[in-house]
């Protein structure tokens, strides 16, 4: 197993046309979740991934499990909960810079994840444990489960990769800041966005933010800068990797998850951190050219095509 992730995946309903959801009459459905988006991205690149979670014992849960399993992600650690529903959410796209999300996840099956659901042997066989700041915000039991999983990873030599992915509506800002700091201090690799770094530390400069996370305990930090690329730091090695220009952005949601998949794929392939970040930037850009969180995630041939055919770091579709 290369990467194991823990978190909630829900069924996403999207209007077939842009604008306010209240005026929509037709919706498409797909599954989406930060952790599984990244796991699917890795699976498409040929890596072995596994997902730990809970879903409702309902039709939406079956929809999710079939979709994730169909992408090659191992779902043997996903539990069907007969007493709680599968979460859902809606995504309305007003325009490329105004994407609105509406979540209905309170009391969902995934929010009932407990330490008993975290299998020590399953995590110990992986090279990386991938977590985000979303899961610990869902409930106290999810919070405890994430820290328990990290404890297992540390005891068994599994590297911890942490994407803060802060969802401000899920928890109090002070508690969120405290938790993100604690989690990032235990992670080997931290993947914050620029705005998240500003929220946590108050600094506006990406290099200062990266150093802040290093001083907090992380070994490697990659600050995502959107279309400007990403800044990385690991010991004395640091640098800015330029972003890939996009002619036509269709849907920016999921780009960060694709970025994480690219970085981890590069590291699993034995590439340098800079080379891995370059792949992350490319996949993040590719994802934005397609509607949906996972629809644009490339396989190796597609990634190679885009990286070789892009002119002056530009991708079009």
Image (tube, grey):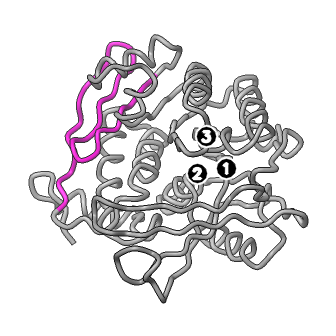
Decide which of 271, 26 is in the foreground and name it: 26
Quadrant of res 70: bottom right
Residue that mark 2 sits on:
35
On the image, the x and y values in percent for residue 39 come to: 57, 54
Is residue 291 found left or right of 171 in the rendered image? left
Residue plotted at (56% across, 64% down):
32
Closer to us: 12 or 31: 12
Q: Quadrant of the C terminus?
A: bottom left
Q: Is the C-beta separation of discs 2 and 3 under 8 Å?
A: yes
C-beta proximity under 8 Å, tags 2 and 1: yes
Q: Is residue 302 above or below residue 192?
A: below
Q: Which residue is mark 1?
A: 7
CA distance separating discs 2 and 1: 6 Å
| Residue 131, numbered label | 3
User: In the picture shown, does residue 5 fall above or below 54?
Assistant: above
In this rendering, the answer to whether 159 lies above or below 17 is: above
Whole-percent x and y of residue 25?
Answer: 48, 88
Picture coordinates of residue 272 (x, y %)?
36, 32
The residues tagged by marks 1 and 3 sit, at their Cα atoms, a distance apart of 7 Å
Residue sitting at x 75%, y 23%: 155
Residue under the image location 25 percent in, 64 percent down: 249
Element marked by disc 3: strand
- In the image, which residues are magenta? 220-246
Q: Main secondary structure of the magenta part?
A: strand
Q: Earlier in the sequence, mark 2 or mark 1?
A: 1
């Amino acid at each position: 197993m290369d990467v194991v992730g823990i978190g909630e995946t829900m069924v996403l309903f999207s209007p077939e046309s842009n604008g306010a959801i209240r005026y929509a009459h037709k919706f498409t459905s797909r599954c989406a979740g930060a952790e599984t988006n990244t796991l699917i991205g890795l699976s498409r690149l040929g890596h072995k991934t596994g997902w730990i979670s809970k879903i409702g014992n309902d039709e939406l849960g079956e929809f999710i499990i079939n979709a994730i399993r169909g992408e090659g992600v191992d779902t043997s650690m996903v539990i069907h909960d007969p007493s709680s529903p599968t979460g859902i959410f809606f995504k309305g796209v007003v325009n490329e810079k105004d994407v609105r999300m509406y979540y209905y996840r309170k009391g969902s099956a995934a929010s009932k994840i407990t330490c008993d659901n975290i299998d020590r042997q399953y995590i110990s066989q992986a090279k990386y444990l991938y977590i985000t700041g979303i899961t610990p915000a869902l409930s106290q039991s999810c919070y405890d489960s994430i820290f328990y999983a990290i404890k297992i990873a540390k005891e068994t030599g599994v590297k911890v990769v942490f994407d803060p992915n802060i969802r401000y509506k899920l928890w109090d800002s002070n508690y969120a800041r405290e938790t993100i700091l604690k989690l990032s201090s235990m992670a080997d690799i931290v993947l914050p966005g620029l705005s998240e770094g500003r929220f946590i530390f108050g600094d506006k400069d990406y290099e200062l933010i990266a150093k802040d996370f290093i001083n907090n305990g992380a070994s490697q930090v990659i600050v995502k800068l959107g279309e400007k690329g990403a800044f990385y730091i690991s010991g004395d090695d640091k640098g800015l990797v330029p972003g890939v220009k996009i002619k036509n952005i269709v849907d920016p949601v999921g780009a960060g998850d694709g970025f994480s998949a690219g970085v981890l794929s590069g590291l699993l392939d034995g590439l340098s951190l800079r080379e891995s970040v370059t792949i992350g930037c490319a996949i993040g850009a590719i994802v934005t050219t397609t509607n949906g969180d996972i629809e644009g995630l490339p396989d190796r041939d597609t990634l190679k095509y885009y990286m070789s055919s892009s002119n002056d770091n530009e991708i079009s579709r």
